[in-house]
Image: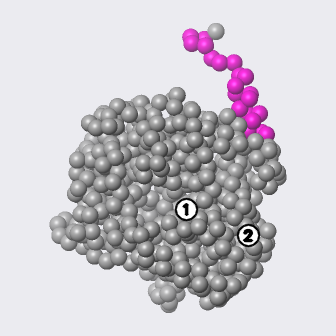
């Protein structure tokens, strides 16, 4: 095959066994690579009910068919898939930078890592030479320190490293995996899975060529996409970057503030993309093969955090800024810096802290229980202090919050559940779902939990294509259509920031794939791939007891606390009645049952008959639950 390396590397950290096997063309075409192929391999290489931190839970490093080529954004990518310690279902993330290309050039499409190393170790992949190396001396090292140490010890600055920090080692359920200092496999706790395996890092050096099938055609397509990247479709990312969203969402009463208490932030101007770029951004850089340059690197020029440096995207700025009631960008930049060093997800960390602040202000726990930290909304110093506590699992509260909002709420007890803003165990991203109701529906049905990157359901709301204060029939189809596209994008592992450059949509993506791999694929076949991946992800979650209607839900605050802000959004929330209308519409658009289970007809249509038993068993469980006698108040 062209573009694909054609090889899967298997590593058992318990036994030290290392072996390879071929990647078949059929598997490649049906699941593409990245997230799609990763989910397929997770399903086939794990047993039902395996805990995310069990040695048998595979940690799967993936490339896409474009990784290692000169393809814009796709050439610089990799992904990680595993069972999520946050949700108990599909966990996945994608990252760009410089690690992915060397991973592919080392000669592998996939690395499947199982077992548990007897001591802290790292995996060293040097083309055909693969070794498990001692990393005991790097215990509790930051990600950056780990990266530098490995390069120095191996004697090559150009080795690329994907690593965890202290939080991953200590099994934080929202720990990330970081490469190239700022780039993260961020969501769903993949760093915690890596830590559970006593694996500090994966280091790669690849010297093999990655050849495409149609060099002249591929070259012309690459030129075309680069030219489009110079145009208006990527202007946002090249100028203010995603922090442009701050003022946009604030104007729509859709900027979640103080843990979804308010929908607007009075300090929005002070944390806007405009203010960030004028006062803090020192340079804008890009990944290998990309024509956009979207990385806005911010540096604090003065004050207590002088010199603090970090890449800052909207979601992370929002989570540690408005969501926590904080309007100080110097503190947010410092918070992001230490979040990266500990290797935590920049979205989840802010949501976890905002949850703690909400609980604190409502008397759910005391200042003494918070190790003396005054966790009031707006306290920037408290934000920094509690992030350190969480990263180290230090103290009662730091240890509990490292479990994520869902499990932390259970452990704290009482009314804490009312302030835990998550879906399926994954913390919400930066949108107020009370005023963006297509997004509310779309986030609720995402297979990895609360996620804006599974179907882009916020877009029609923000762009005014629908009535964002209402859920009505037709929203399900919007979400279904977009999720197919997003599944393919994440399997090719092209950056979602580049999606606007594919003017012909599916036709461009199919052409991109065929030019690189030489495997003919039609638009219809590629759309079917997107549908197949969605169904397979749902079946995996069903297998793990997580995929029925009851798990497609919204946080208590979204359903029970009306927007208090003056303006057109005042009084808005998502009622159970309209939400159920949306779920029914979504399931019907997918040809799933009213309980959210893919029908046998749909399973056959997408070629997943071998997993039909999962849906059949799930249907029996739902039926048995419905027929079970309900308990009466006060007993019999």
Residue 387 among magenta residues: no
Q: Is residue 296 visible?
A: yes
Of labels 2 and 1, earlier in sequence is 1
Region in magenta? 616-635
Nearest to the observer: residue 583 or residue 370: 583
For residue 104, which numbered disc appears in the image?
none
Report the side of 104 relative to 143 (left or right): right
Q: Which residue is mark 1?
A: 93
Q: Is residue 101 visible?
A: no
User: Which residue occupies the foreground of this view, 203 or 24?
Assistant: 24
Task: Look at 33% across and 61% down and name the residue there.
Answer: 244
Q: Is residue 204 left or right of residue 566?
A: right
Quadrant hosting residue 434: top left
Please state if 139 lies on the left or on the right of 544 as rendered.
left
Q: From the viewer's perspective, is residue 532 above or below residue 254?
A: below
Give the residue pinned by disc 2: 521
How crowded pointer 1 is (Cα within 10 Å; few <14, some 14-19, many 20+) is rated as many
Q: Nearer the viewer, residue 474 or 322?
A: 474
How many numbered marks appear? 2
- Label 2 neighbour load within 10 Å: few <14, some 14-19, many 20+: some
Asked if 131 appears above or below 425 in the picture, the reply is below
Front residue of this view, candidates 353 and 299: 299
């Amino acid at each position: 095959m062209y573009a694909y390396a054609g090889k899967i590397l298997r590593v058992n950290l318990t036994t030290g066994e290392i072996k390879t096997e071929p990647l078949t063309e059929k598997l490649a075409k049906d699941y593409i690579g990245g997230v799609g192929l990763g989910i397929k391999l997770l399903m086939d290489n794990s047993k039902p009910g395996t805990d995310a931190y069990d040695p048998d839970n595979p940690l799967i490093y993936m490339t896409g068919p474009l990784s290692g080529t000169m393809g814009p954004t796709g050439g610089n990518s990799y992904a990680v898939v595993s069972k999520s310690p946050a949700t108990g279902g599909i966990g996945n993330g994608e990252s760009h930078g410089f690690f992915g290309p060397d991973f592919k050039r080392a000669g592998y499409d996939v690395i499947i890592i199982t077992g548990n190393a007897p001591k802290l170790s790292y995996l060293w992949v040097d083309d055909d030479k693969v070794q498990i190396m001692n990393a005991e001396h790097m215990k509790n090292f930051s990600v950056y320190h780990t990266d530098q140490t490995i390069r120095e010890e191996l004697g090559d600055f150009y080795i690329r490293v994907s690593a965890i920090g202290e939080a991953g080692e200590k099994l934080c359920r929202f720990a990330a995996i970081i490469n190239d200092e700022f780039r993260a496999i961020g969501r769903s706790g993949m760093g915690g899975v890596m830590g559970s395996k006593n694996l500090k890092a994966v280091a790669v050096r690849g010297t093999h060529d990655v050849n495409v099938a149609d060099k002249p055609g591929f070259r012309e397509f690459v030129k075309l996409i680069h030219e489009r990247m110079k145009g208006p479709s990527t202007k946002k990312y090249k100028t203010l970057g995603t922090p442009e969203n701050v003022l946009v969402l604030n104007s729509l009463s859709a900027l979640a503030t103080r843990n979804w208490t308010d929908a607007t932030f009075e300090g929005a101007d002070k944390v806007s993309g405009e203010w960030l770029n004028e006062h803090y951004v020192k340079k804008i850089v890009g990944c290998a093969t990309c024509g956009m340059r979207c990385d806005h690197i911010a540096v604090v020029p003065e004050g207590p955090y002088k010199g603090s440096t970090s890449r800052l995207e909207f979601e992370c700025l929002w989570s540690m800024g408005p969501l926590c009631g904080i309007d100080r960008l110097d503190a947010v930049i410092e918070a992001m810096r230490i979040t990266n060093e500990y290797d935590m997800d920049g979205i989840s960390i802010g949501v976890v802290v905002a949850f703690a602040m909400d609980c604190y202000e409502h008397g759910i726990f005391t200042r003494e229980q918070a190790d003396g930290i005054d966790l009031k909304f707006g306290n920037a110093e408290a934000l920094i202090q509690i992030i350190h506590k969480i990263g180290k699992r230090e103290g009662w509260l730091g240890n509990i919050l490292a479990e994520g909002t869902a499990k932390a709420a259970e452990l704290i007890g009482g009314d804490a559940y009312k302030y835990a803003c998550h879906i399926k165990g994954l913390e919400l991203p930066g949108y107020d779902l009370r005023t963006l109701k297509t997004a509310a529906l779309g986030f609720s049905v995402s297979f990895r939990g609360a996620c804006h990157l599974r179907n882009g359901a916020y877009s029609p709301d923000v762009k005014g294509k629908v009535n964002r204060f209402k859920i009505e029939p037709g929203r399900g189809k919007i979400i279904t259509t977009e999720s197919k596209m997003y599944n393919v994008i994440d399997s090719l592992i092209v950056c979602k920031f580049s999606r606007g450059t594919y003017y012909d949509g599916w036709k461009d993506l199919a052409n991109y794939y065929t030019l690189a791999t030489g495997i003919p694929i039609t638009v219809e076949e590629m759309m079917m791939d997107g549908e197949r991946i969605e169904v397979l992800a749902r079946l995996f979650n069903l297998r793990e007891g997580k995929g029925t209607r009851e798990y497609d839900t919204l946080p208590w605050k979204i359903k029970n606390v009306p927007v208090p802000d003056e303006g057109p959004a005042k009084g808005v929330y998502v009622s159970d009645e309209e939400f159920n209308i949306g779920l029914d519409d979504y399931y019907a658009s997918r040809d799933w049952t009213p309980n959210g289970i893919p029908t046998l007809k749909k399973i056959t249509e997408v070629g997943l008959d071998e997993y039909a038993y999962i849906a059949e068993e799930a249907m029996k469980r739902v039926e048995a639950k419905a027929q079970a006698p309900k308990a009466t108040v006060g007993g019999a």
